[in-house]
Amino acid sequence: MENHPAVQMLETELGSDFLKADIRTPKRIIVSIKPGAILRSAEYLHKVAGFRFIIASALHTRNGFEIHYHFSRDQEGLILNLHVVLDAVEPRIESLSNMFSASNWIEREIHELFGIDFLNHPNQEKLISEGNWAEDVFPYRKKFKSATES
Amino acid sequence: MGRKVLIPIGPYHPLQEEPELFKLYCDGEIVRDVKWETGYNHRGIEKLSESKTYEQVFFLVERICGICSTSHPFAFANAVEEIAGIEPTNRAKYIRSIIGELERIHSHLLWLGLAGHFLGYNTVFMWAWKYREPILDLFEMITGNRNSYAMFRVGGVRRDIEESKISAIEKVLDEFRRKNDLLTGAVMDDPVIHARTKGVGVLTRQDIIDYCAVGPTARASGVATDVRKDDPYAAYPLVDWQVVTAEEGDVFAKTKVRLLEMNESVSIIRQCLKGLLKEKEGDIMVKVNEIPEGIGQGRAEAPRGEVFHFVVSDGSNSPARHKIRAPSYVNIATFKKSCIGQTISDATITLAAVDPCYCCTERLAVAYDFSTGEKIMNAKSLMDISVAKTAEIMKIQGKKHE
């Protein structure tokens, strides 16, 4: 399938930080990048290419922690995911919240539920369970079992 | 610099779909800062979804929101069908769109009523909610339920709309269209509503882009984003309709967008009903054998904006990961922009304008003075401020307040 111009631009901008592009359909693209390139990539998509940030989804998989940053280019109905794989023991990645406010809440939520650190986040407090939940217990990690599951 | 006063709004109110606590930091009458606390009703639905089968998840996500209860199953169906590569039949697509649009009408009417109520304009509230009833009756006739319709499943819908019902539906729509014209005219021409909503809570185009806001909130600021047009699903590409936008970005523009959108919805439903007549009755399901491994991203335009579902399948019969984003999640953050610098009497309608069903002033606990901890204002008095402002404007314009 033909490459989208945004993907080509990302490939040239990022160089070796660009890992691969999975063009599933003309409207669904997943671009895998190295975590260190997240700021540059998001800045290009949001500021230059006119993408809207939808949300970020974190996953706990056998590769470690993964985050899909979903961006939408509304004129084309395109969803482009920036996909990063983070360290399994000490997951951390640069925060996007200084670039656009839309990622502020979701980064706090992911930090709280998965224990992923967002570096330079303006206010990485708990979003959901302030004061009502144990420290360093992350309910959305795979190891976590609820009372009824164990 | 006067004394800074903290006014908490929330966290619980029966009108709200999501309990949240907003803290308005006020200097005199002017709101200087807004902070919020959320998570009061975190139900762990994303985690719960991983323990349900795909068929069960529909009933789970239907219960995320009590008002737009069909938008989440809609987006989830789109996501799962993307993984499985299923295309529903045209008849199922039409029925899906009919349910989606009926829901938009009832949700916008609900919002309009509440907005009127919080301006102290109970006539608008009475009218809007009265006109909403026949729409809910339609839901009962089509699905058996006034809310949480349980219509969606992977590959189609659960119930058909029989041809014998179509003329009855059209009759209700014709009646509603007349009433909505009346309501639109009354609301748009009212000088008091103009005075209370024009230039209030303005969001510029740039604010929308920065906050990535969606739905009527974005469309009222001139950003024509609508998933139904941008990333067409169900029967929306099969019918002819327009995206309604406004440029001003204030509360009035948001009201206008919602009022006019209801007319578009009626037009979409009418075309879908015509479409149904062309399709074979009962042809509402595609057989689904299994959901293969893969990633699916489904979107649907809920009354409040884009609902986004991200589903990861590992080939088993339940999702391996299910991420959900409701439109209010991004829209509520715009309060930081729209509320600051406004007066407290406008804060309620500004918060309500985003339609988080957040018209909860009467539930305000107590406002404290920072330095002394003394109670200076109770729940009712803040509501009264808003009503009093309307009354004052009416007095100036020589009208009698109800």
Image (cartoon, coloured by chain):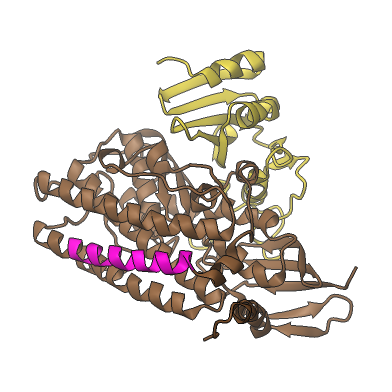
Chain colours: A yellow, B brown
Q: Is residue B221 above or below residue B19?
A: above
- The residue lying at 45 percent from left, 60 percent from top is B64
Q: How many marks?
A: 0
Specify the farthest residue to the front. Answer: B398
Q: The N terminus of chain A lies in which quarter of the figure?
A: top left
Could you say which is closer to the camera, residue B293 or residue B159? Answer: B159
Apparent side of residue B291 relative to residue A148 in the rendered image (left or right): left
Q: Name which quarter of the figure residue B263 lies in.
A: bottom left
- The residue lying at 40 percent from left, 24 percent from top is A26
Q: Which residues are magenta?
A: B170-189
Q: Is residue B172 magenta?
A: yes
The x and y percentages for residue B4 are: 84, 71
Provide the major secondary structure of the magenta segment: helix
Apparent side of residue A6 relative to residue B172 in the rendered image (left or right): right
- The residue lying at 64 percent from left, 82 percent from top is B384
Residue B147 in sight in this render: no
Q: Is residue A61 magenta?
A: no
Could you say which is closer to the camera, residue A86 or residue A63? Answer: A86
The x and y percentages for residue B365 are: 67, 80
Q: Is residue A36 above or below residue B60?
A: above
Apparent side of residue B315 relative to residue A119 in the rendered image (left or right): left
The x and y percentages for residue B325 are: 51, 49
Residue B76 in sight in this render: yes
The x and y percentages for residue B372 are: 88, 81
Q: Name which quarter of the figure residue A126 lies in.
A: bottom right
- The residue lying at 53 percent from left, 62 percent from top is B356
